[in-house]
Amino acid sequence: MNTGIDAAIEVRDLTKRYGSTLAVDGVSFAVRAGHVTGFVGPNGAGKTTTMRVILGLHTADAGSALVTGRPYRTLRTPLRHVGALLDAAAVHPGRRARDHLLWMAHSNGLPTRRVDEVLELVGLGSVARRRAGGFSMGMRQRLGIAGALLGDPPVLIFDEPVNGLDPEGILWIRGLLKELAAEGRAVLVSSHLMGELEGSADHLVVIGRGRVIADTSVRELLAAASGGRVVVRTSARPEAMTVLANAGATVAATAPDMITIEGMGGDQVAALLARHGLPFSELAQHRASLEEAYMDLTRDAVDYAGGVRTETVEA
Amino acid sequence: MTTPTMERPTAALPARDGFGPAVRAEWTKLRSVRSTAIMVFLAMALTVLLSMLAAYGSSTNAGSGPTYVDRFHFVHRPMSGDGSITVRVASQANSHESARAGIMIKSSVEQGTPYAAIMVTPGHGARMQSGFKPDVAGSPNGAPRWLRLTRTGSSVTGYESADGATWTPVATVQVALPSTAQAGLFVASPGKFRVVHYRNGSSTSGHDETVGRAVFDDVDVRTAAAPVPGQWSDQDVGTGPPPEMIPPGFTRSVPGTASESNGVFTVTGSGDIGSLPPGGNDDVVMNGLAGVYFGLIALMVLGVLFATSEFRTGLVRTTLTVVPRRAHVLAGKALVVGTVGLAAGLIGSVGAFFVVQPIQRSHGYVAPAYPPPSLTDPTVLRAVAGTAVVLALLAVFGLAVGTIVRRTAGALIVVLPLVLVPALISDALAPSTSAWLRRLVPTAGLAIQQTRDRWDTAIGPWQGLGVLAAYTAGALAMAFWLLRRRDA
């Protein structure tokens, strides 16, 4: 059933239903070694459910999820194969950070020295003997990541690891993710904010309403999202808009002296404006940010659209 | 903080799979939170302290009274020197299986003086007795029966016969008799024990007096070969309990009677002859462990929390991710919390056992009625060690219910009433309902603490422990099934 020799995680036609709610609807994707795969989608899109099924916590109604070619629940020392951070808040508040990692290490027969190694690795060495109840969200994220790294696994799964981190922590995570992938590990990292993954993920699986919307590299996604849009700065905005619209383009005013044109190439726009003697000072092919590309993709897939922020201003 | 440097993935990191690591992980979890230490300490401290409190509130009057009972109706005449008395007990009313009708040679009519007696009983055949020692059993025959006592110096031999011709000796006893003793017929019948439960939950126990009745004929008292002439007299030896000691509703004692007509004697009387039971009827070992009832709550809550804290925090997902074999997780938890329960229970029950003993002694629980209990006595050991087993099982029961219910409050609402409600309401129920209730709840396991058969015993020690074990096994099986089946 393997599609590729380097598919560390392979999800195939996965369906999961909770009562009448279809949480995951035929999701398929693969996570390859040596890459950071971003798993993005709005809240409630099915990311966490998919991850729980991958980790054998929830049983799929249909389809399969394999980790290094096997169902997770058949793994015997799972920490040596897969490290997972699901919910950083899921620690007993009365247990010391070191003890939290210690019981995890014991469960897979890992040596105690490994606990101290990962504590240093995530920067919690100095608070190892403090109780997790007093930890900030950022410290808990680090503790959770330490747990995922305990068994030095080739596959890592992080659910929203950036949540609650300060800017320094976010930078740290980004560096860590890239480094883990550079070491040849497969890294699956979920987020509901595309911006969090910008600069660290090199492959994206976008999910909305339980379905995969896009499964693509970051470069391809950006190119697709930017396609065919031209931005022009002009002092004669109304006239330019009329001319371009009459020529069949879709025109939007995005600032007092700025218009965005869709459905017409840059050269054509320049020629048209010149022919009508309209002045323009700047003409650029628009470059979409990852966030915008994501917004385009998920606009239809957002369950609760009221809170969605768009960056295009309608004329 | 700086970006850390990961070492390359190494194959050198050793790992081990199996039940052993799962148990070790659960042990690390259990010992690394403060609530464990608090609950274990509470279990031990409550057991010892509340057992002490109960001992301070206990009292007994056992040991203050006589160690024998000597009460019957006596129809007698003096007999000087060696001699014998022969009689046929023609009939005996079945007032009590141990009612006594027979003949006696006694120093005097004073209570407690030396005597030798042979008698028949409705339920236990012919018996011979002296010195308030246990009876010597004769034939299993009751009335009609011929009986004879022969005195030679300080020796008295008892005989019985079916026909008055062929005599069988029952026993020869040594009795310190004066040269002139009283010889004659006697009748006694012990009271019957009864417990009355009232609607308000209280209960009273006491004895209903019974009246024995027997008909004697062919009475013959002689020294050497000559019949002893003289007048018969009769009286009650000893007295019944004073009226104020008899609870309302119980049958009171009546004086014995005797009548004679043509050599046929009809005698009635109440009472008994012999030693009192070696001790009072209080179960000092069980009473000395009374505080366990509160200690077990702490351990059961520990079991509940060991499960529900994982569900509350979501930690259970981490647990099931690192140990995907869910049976290992629950079995490991059960083993760990059960062992902790056993250890805490042992410390608590052995501690309570020794701490309460001086208190019980100072409250009247002394030999001979209450010889000091010893752990070398298998029954006592069963009570003390069994208490620890009960605590271990209840901790596992709490764990199982916590796994099934998943929420702390919900699980406590299930387990606490199971333990507390019977203790609170059983006294208010009809006795038979209350006994059934106490047989059917998990705390029936505390029956393992019984060291005496008492009228208020609801269930035997092992059966009671069996009830608790069944609860624990059932809950654990359901918890296994649900944990395997449910999404985490």
Image (cartoon, coloured by chain):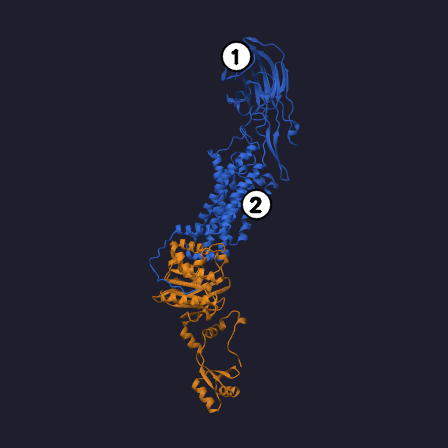
Chain colours: A orange, B blue
Q: Answer yes or no: is residue B431 visible.
A: yes
Would you say the residues marked 2 and 1 are in contact, meaning their CB atoms lie under 8 Å apart? no
The relative height of residue B348 versus residue B69 in the rendered view (above or below) is below
What number is the disc on residue B420? 2
Up the image or down, B379 lies above or below B173; here it is: below
- The x, y position of residue A95, in whole percent, is 47, 54
Please state if B383 lies on the left or on the right of B96 as rendered.
Answer: left
Between the residue at mark 2 and the residue at mark 1, the CA separation in whole angstroms equals 66 Å
Q: Quadrant of residue B290?
A: top right
User: B458 and B6: which one is in front?
Assistant: B6
Q: Say if residue A60 shows up in the picture.
A: no
Three-letter amino acid code of the residue under disc 2: Leu
**Both marks 2 and 1 on one chain:** yes
> Image height check: is B182 above or below B31?
above
Residue B406 x, y percent position in the rendering: 51, 54
Disc 2 element: helix
The kind of residue tagged 1 is: Gly
Q: Is disc 1 surrounded by few (<14), some (14 to 19) or many (20+) residues within 10 Å?
A: some
Mark 2 belongs to chain: B
Dot 1 corresponds to which residue? B153
Residue at x 61%, y 26% (from the top left corner): B210
Q: Secondary structure at mark 1?
A: loop
Q: Earlier in the sequence, mark 2 or mark 1?
A: 1
